[in-house]
Image (cartoon, grey):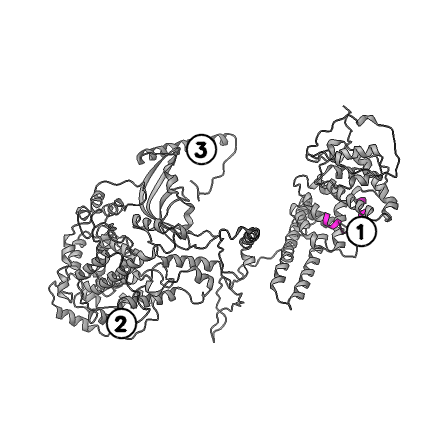
Amino acid sequence: MFRYPSLEDCPLDEDEDAFQALGEEDEDIDQFNDDTFGAGAVDDDWQEAHERLAELEDKAGSSREPDGPVGNDGDVLGDPEDALAERLTRLVIDSELEDPAIMQAVHTRDPPQQPGGLNSSIWDSSAMLRRIRGPLLAQEMPSVSVLDYALPQRPPQARDEERDPSERALPRRSSSPIIGSPPVRAIPIGTPPKQAAIPNFNQQILCPKPVHIRATMQQRYPAPYGERMSPNQLCNVPNSSLLGHPFPHSVSPVLTHLQRAQLLGGAQAGRMSPSQFARVSGLVGSPLPSVNPKLLQGRVGQMMSPAGGFRAFFGAPPAPPPSQLPHPPGPGSHLQNLRPQPQMFRPDTTHLHPQHRRLLHQRQQNRNQHRSLNGSGGDRGGHRSSHQEQIRKDPYANLMLQREKDWVSKIQMMQLQSTDPYLDDYYYQNYFQKLEKLAAAEEVHGDGPKKERTKLITPQVAKLEHTYKPVQFEGSLGKLTVSSVNNPRKMIDAVVTSRSEDDETKEKQVRDKRRQTLVTIEKTYSLLLDVEDYERRYLLSLEGERPALMGERKQKICDMYDNLRGKAPGQDRPSDDHFMQIMCIRKGKRLVARILPFLAPEQAADVLMATARNLPFLIKKDAQDEVLPCLLRPFSHVLYHLPLGTVTSLVQQLTNLPQSAAAPTNLHLTAVLQNKFGLSLLYLVLSRGEELQSSDRNTELMQDNQWTELMLMVTRELLRIPQGALAKPVSIPSNLISLFSRYVDQQKLNLLETKLHAGDPVDLRGSSPPLECSRGRMEGRKDGWMEGTRFTPHLPRRPAWHMGHICPPVPG
Amino acid sequence: MNYMPGTASLIQDIDKKHLGLLRDGRTLIGYLRSIDQFANLVLHQTVERIHVGKKYGDIPRGIFVVRGENVVLLGEIDLEKERDTPLQQVSIEEILEEQRVEQQAKQESEKLKVQALKERGLSVPRADTLDEY
């Protein structure tokens, strides 16, 4: 199709007619082609555009009136790009995500303010290259290949040249999820160039005389390029307008990142941005493979221009806040010299299509104006002045555009989408609830609204039931065997076989049993969490659903209790074994503590009984964890609803009395007394008993022998136990003394009192209530052995479980 | 404008000077220019800082693009406080030399340790090579 297999072969002095002929050959290929080469050929002079731009940039403050959103023919350049930007925005922003929260997070700006930098630069690069390679670029198809990714809905009809450029722009590389991997390169990036290619390449690219349509433009091109000898040399050339400091101070320093990339690419010292490169390769189509490598190599060669370029870039940092980067000597210094000069920074657009270049400049000027107006767009909320100062000092600021920030922020918000925030993000929700409560409480005190805690409103998504149906084709035998995350397939058939060997070791049995218990605990915990959640669900649910919710809740509570106690086959629950297993594990104890409030009174009492019955065992097991005291609070709640009979039996359990009361030492009780939890529990029970007793004088308790016996036993034990062995209880109910006063004499009462309060930091002896006249024996004689003894504060210590005798201390 | 209050989002950190610790132990200081949803970072005017004892040395590196998964920590540098550091800056050659010496010393002590353990019949399990520096 092309007359010349390679660019080198193409005679430099080919006249325009030949070119036109070539162009006509390809009319049927692509509309764009015509637009670019035919009507699209521009009339503008880059120098004029440059001057215009310089003028515009000099007037920093002038603001352009914003364009209307779409379709004004008056301002050709602004609107199509904005329209395109709009379309791209829509493209990127999934329409399903019309979640207000997400939308809030994204700063939607007015369309005219949409940065469309990418568009213009794409224009420039693609068209420019097209123009250079004359016959090659007549084949337009490859050039739009990348574009096709971006704009699948591109309308095929012919358009004005003005509208055309903008519609062909690629979306931002960073934001479009649609574009896949970059186009395949003929030669990978980083291929070292052949030495010979570079000058040739330069010459050819830069002397477009024969191929270019507009003769006037041609002379400009060779000149700047011709000056460039080599990347390194270029660095050393002062006042090189091409190299020029990328960010001269006079220029509004904020440029689009693409432009900067272009600058770097254009400036021979730098490298070509990947986007440009992509376009280059995209443009250079397959039909001329022989030329491509050279071109690519040439470009790559430029890109690979080594340290010189790097140093040049690196060595001339703009004046940011105190930077600790050292200034490399050498080439860098040249650039330093360049800096103070108010260089009109001119990106290297000599290889670009003039119209595209014009667009680029126009957009640049747009953007600069918008930038100066917008500021950072959100980086520093109220600190305008410091921020603008920052802009002045940091010309690299805002490389990441507002749009890109919004895009990232939108992705993050999407990740927060949740159908049930209390499930997915429990701690965050609770934290903010607490904060709000605090803030509300503070506000109530009349402090006025303090700092507003901005809360992140996470997007709420309605739960949609998706039933995944695997893909099936009509008329095919069988189904597609595809397993994905939505449709997992069972790959391994793992069957659990429980070994029932007879010679299973004891250890294994124990271990299995423990594992069973752990599993039970976990299951019960799940039930518990559900039950605890019911209150919230109740509030959120509709009227009709509530009974069902309550029913569910009840059922779950029953299940929990069953789990706790073990499903007994018969009515009776003969064995506490299951319960004890659970209680041996720390998590189990906490579980019981949390479940107790939900249980029915009988069930709770049952649990309490079981605990009391086995308390010494539990104490022994708890020696390491010391978690039993967590049960005290729920136990106390339970206690205060217990009837008399239960209380009695409870004490009985605690003291393990049914055996002969004549046992000299009651190990059970002793153990209880020596344990913090046990003692506290005992006190609570006794206190409850006393409460019942004192509330109604005629209660059975008073006549109850059992109770009296128990009391005597308790008091006897309390007296007997040495001070040091007595545990420090969590709390001492105040009515204990009055309780004891019924059963013991004054002296013993005093002793008891001292013992009880021995651990208190504050000596409560003086404040004890006046003692009732006991019905018991009143012994007047003094027993002197305890008098005069000073009681030191009883320091808490680990309760010791003494199996042996406990000897009273020798009186000192 | 407050981007995503109550969350850890890097958007507010853009264009500020940061110090990042990477998984291979490098410390990079640079201006954070761009991020994405994976917390891939673009650091500008990056300097790799090597610390040995109380001294440090800076190696200018230019622009760094760091893959998000390789970042251990990232924090903003307070420019005022940066001046008051008790550490002493030395030249690159010096710090590299110091680093080499330090590495050598560490290796030697490690060798001695392994030797001692071997004598006693014990062996140190080899640590996995990932994230080890």
The residue under label 3 is B110
The magenta stretch spans which residues? A636-651
Asked if residue B61 lies left or right of residue A207, the reply is: right
Residue most toward the front?
A446
Q: Is residue A390 magenta?
A: no
Q: Nearer the viewer, residue A317 or A496?
A: A317
- Quick one: SS at disc 2? loop
Mark 3, other Cα within 10 Å: few <14 / some 14–19 / many ≥20? few
Pointer 2 chain: A
Label 3 – label 2 distance at C-alpha = 76 Å
Label 3 – label 1 distance at C-alpha = 70 Å
The mark found on residue A73 in the picture is 2
Are the residues at dot 2 and dot 1 in contact (C-beta closer than 8 Å)? no
| Vertical side of A282 occupied by A73: above or below | below
The residue under label 1 is A643
Mark 2, other Cα within 10 Å: few <14 / some 14–19 / many ≥20? few
Quarter holding residue A93: bottom left
Asked if residue A441 lies left or right of residue A502, the reply is: left
Please state which of the two labelled residues, at mark 2 or mark 1, is closer to the viewer: 2
Q: Are marks 3 and 1 on the same chain?
A: no
What residue do we see at 64% from left, 59% from top? A535
**Sequence-first tag of 2 and 1:** 2
x, y percent for residue A551: 68, 63
Asked if residue A205 lies left or right of residue B41, the reply is: left
Magenta stretch: dominant SS?
helix
Q: Nearer the viewer, residue A48 or A85?
A: A48
Are the residues at dot 3 and dot 2 in contact (C-beta closer than 8 Å)? no
- Quick one: SS at disc 3? helix
